[in-house]
């Protein structure tokens, strides 16, 4: 209702003022009842937004489980790699003091020892025990410094033109006898 509406009805200004004042009181009373309408509207929007986020709850839960599984798998793989590197280091240290007949033998035994160390039944056994078990019955693996070594002979050239190592050493010591 407006003042112009009341004037259009032929109501005097002083009476229109009283009607407008009474109408204002009624409007204010109704506004007081619904004064928190805007706050409630904002709370409703916030609740809707939050609930929309929970629509994907099952997907989020599945993602979290997948990430957890991936993490646990990565930790397990890392621990296996660390254990393998530690075993390789122990074997390298153990075999480092031994003189093998060649590098191929050393590498083969290193790989075999690593395989033995990784077996469950090898837990608690020393590297000495495992090395003895792996090399049992094998010969020509380690160079024995106590065994006499065959002499090393230089090349034997024939034809009489060139001198071999022994002849050259002899004539170097006795140049007067050189032919």
Image: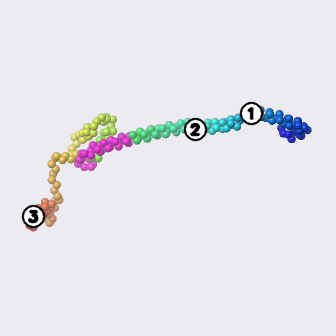
Q: Secondary structure at mark 3?
A: loop
Q: How many marks?
A: 3
Quote the CA–CA distance across marks 2 and 1. Answer: 40 Å
- Residue 61 image position (x, y, % from top left): 53, 36
Residue at the image point whose x is 89% and y is 40% from the top: 8
Q: Are marks 2 and 1 in contact (CB under 8 Å)?
A: no
Q: Magenta stretch mostly in which secondary structure?
A: helix
Is residue 83 located in the magenta-colored stretch of the structure?
Answer: yes
- Left/right placement of residue 28 relative to residue 158 reads right
- Residue 9 image position (x, y, % from top left): 90, 38
Q: Quadrant of residue 45?
A: top right
Q: Earlier in the sequence, mark 3 or mark 2?
A: 2
Q: Earlier in the sequence, mark 2 or mark 1?
A: 1
Q: Which mark is residue 98?
A: none
Residue at the image point whose x is 15% and y is 60% from the top: 165
Q: Quadrant of residue 95?
A: top left
Considering depth in this image, is 129 or 17 the residue closer to the camera?
17
- Which region of the structure is painted magenta? 80-105
Q: Which corner quadrant holds the N terminus? A: top right
- Residue 160 image position (x, y, % from top left): 13, 65
Q: Residues within 10 Å of mark 1 (few under 14, many from 20)?
A: few
Q: Secondary structure at mark 1?
A: helix
Q: Residues within 10 Å of mark 3 (few under 14, many from 20)?
A: few
Nearer to us: label 3 or label 2: 3
- Residue 152 image position (x, y, % from top left): 16, 54
Quote the CA–CA distance across marks 1 and 3. Answer: 133 Å
Quote the CA–CA distance across marks 3 and 2. Answer: 100 Å
Q: Which mark is residue 56?
A: 2
Residue furthest to the left in view is 177
Residue that mark 1 sits on: 32
Residue that mark 3 sits on: 174
- Left/right placement of residue 48 relative to residue 103 reads right
């Amino acid at each position: 209702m407006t003042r112009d509406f009341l004037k259009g009805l032929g109501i005097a200004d002083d009476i229109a003022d009283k009607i407008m004042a009474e109408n204002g009181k009624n409007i204010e009373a109704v506004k007081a009842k619904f004064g928190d309408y805007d706050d409630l509207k904002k709370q409703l929007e916030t609740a809707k937004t939050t609930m929309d986020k929970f629509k994907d709850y099952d997907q989020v839960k599945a993602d979290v489980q997948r990430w957890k599984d991936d993490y646990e798998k990565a930790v397990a793989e890392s621990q296996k790699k660390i254990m393998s590197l530690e075993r390789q280091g122990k074997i390298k240290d153990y075999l480092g003091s031994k003189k093998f007949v060649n590098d191929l033998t050393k590498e083969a035994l290193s790989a075999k020892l690593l395989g033995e160390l990784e077996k469950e039944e090898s837990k608690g056994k020393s590297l000495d025990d495992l090395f003895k078990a792996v090399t049992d019955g094998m010969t020509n693996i380690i160079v024995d410094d106590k065994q006499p070594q065959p002499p090393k002979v230089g090349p034997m050239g024939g034809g009489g033109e060139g001198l071999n190592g022994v002849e050259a050493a002899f004539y170097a010591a006795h140049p007067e006898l050189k032919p």
